[in-house]
Image (cartoon, helix red, strand yellow):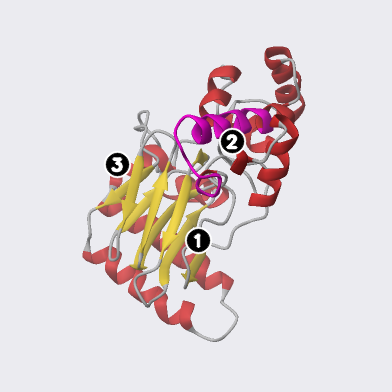
Amino acid sequence: MSTSQPKLPPIVHACYFASSSRGEQFIPVHTFSYQQAGKIAANDGTKEYEFNEGEFRFAVGNKLAKYYKIPPPNGAFRSIAIFFDEEMLREMSAIHGFTATQKPGSDIFLRLTPHQAYKDLFNSLIPYLNADQTLDKELLNLKAREALLIIMKVNPELKDILFDFSKPGKIDLETFMQKNYHFKVSLERFAFLTGRSLATFKRDFEKVFNISPSRWLTQRRLQQAYYLIKEMGKRPSEIYVDLGFEDFSHFTYAFRQLYGASPTKI
């Protein structure tokens, strides 16, 4: 289902006391989450999403998305996420006969209607996740499988997402990159999402743009930064993260190299 990567633990409990947008902007596997406290704002490049305390959400894997975790006043952002990797999904498909029967919709994030079975599931996880001890991997694997079976009972329509094991097909490179250049992901991710190996992606990219992917991404992001600062009156500190730069100093240095002046002087 995805490019090679470190295997995720089946269940993760996140806790942040400050607003956070850390991490690569890519959802590697299908994810079922419960928002315990605070809220999360997300953007897939075309649509905005927001999930508040007490809500359940489903995130579609192998997709690009930006997300911002916001704690409540004087509190901590807390959420529990259950990850469904391809190995487990294929195993459950073979055992239970789950299959996709039609093409799923285009939304990356789905708000799930609260259901008692979902509440009971996540409540059952809290004692294990809060315990001051090494988490039992086998137990968490069993709970992830339990979560999948509950989803199939409560939201069976999600089978068309969960059990679609097709790989991304080869798509138009220029259209895709012009739409998604601002996502902070590796070239390997871009290659996978356009249906190419990394070597083929680089070769096709240079044929289309006459420049290497890394240099094009930097220049395209800086061009957009210049437009936002010069024409839209945006402050440099407001935009560099949304354009895929790691930190402000790197953004400022790259901007000065291309335009001969720091972004604050434009």
Q: Are marks 2 and 1 in contact (CB under 8 Å)?
A: no
Q: Which mark is residue 20?
A: 1
Residue 245 percent coordinates (x, y): 63, 44
Give the left or right position of residue 17, taking residue 104 as reference: right
The secondary structure type at the circle numbered 2 is loop
Q: Earlier in the sequence, mark 2 or mark 1?
A: 1
The secondary structure type at the circle numbered 3 is helix
Q: Are marks 1 and 3 in contact (CB under 8 Å)?
A: no
Which region of the structure is painted magenta?
Answer: 218-238
Q: Please identify the residue farthest to the top as the structure is shown.
A: 207
For badge 1, the amino acid type reads Ser
Where is 198 relative to 14, above or below?
Answer: above
- The residue singled out by tag 3 in the image is 157
Give the left or right position of residue 104, taking residue 82 as reference: left
- Assign the C terminus to one quadrant of the image: top right
Q: Quadrant of residue 116?
A: bottom left
Q: Which mark is residue 266?
A: 2
Where is 136 relative to 39, above or below?
Answer: below
Res 54 seen here: yes
Residue 61 percent coordinates (x, y): 49, 43
Residue drawn at point x = 53 percent, y = 52 percent:
88
Q: CA distance from mark 2 to mark 3?
A: 51 Å
The secondary structure type at the circle numbered 1 is loop
Residue 226 falls within the magenta-colored stretch: yes
Q: Nearer the viewer, residue 190 or 230?
A: 230
Mark 2 or 3, closer to the camera: 2
Considering the whole magenta stretch, tell me its main secondary structure.
helix
Where is 231 relative to 147, above or below?
Answer: above
Q: Quadrant of residue 9?
A: bottom right
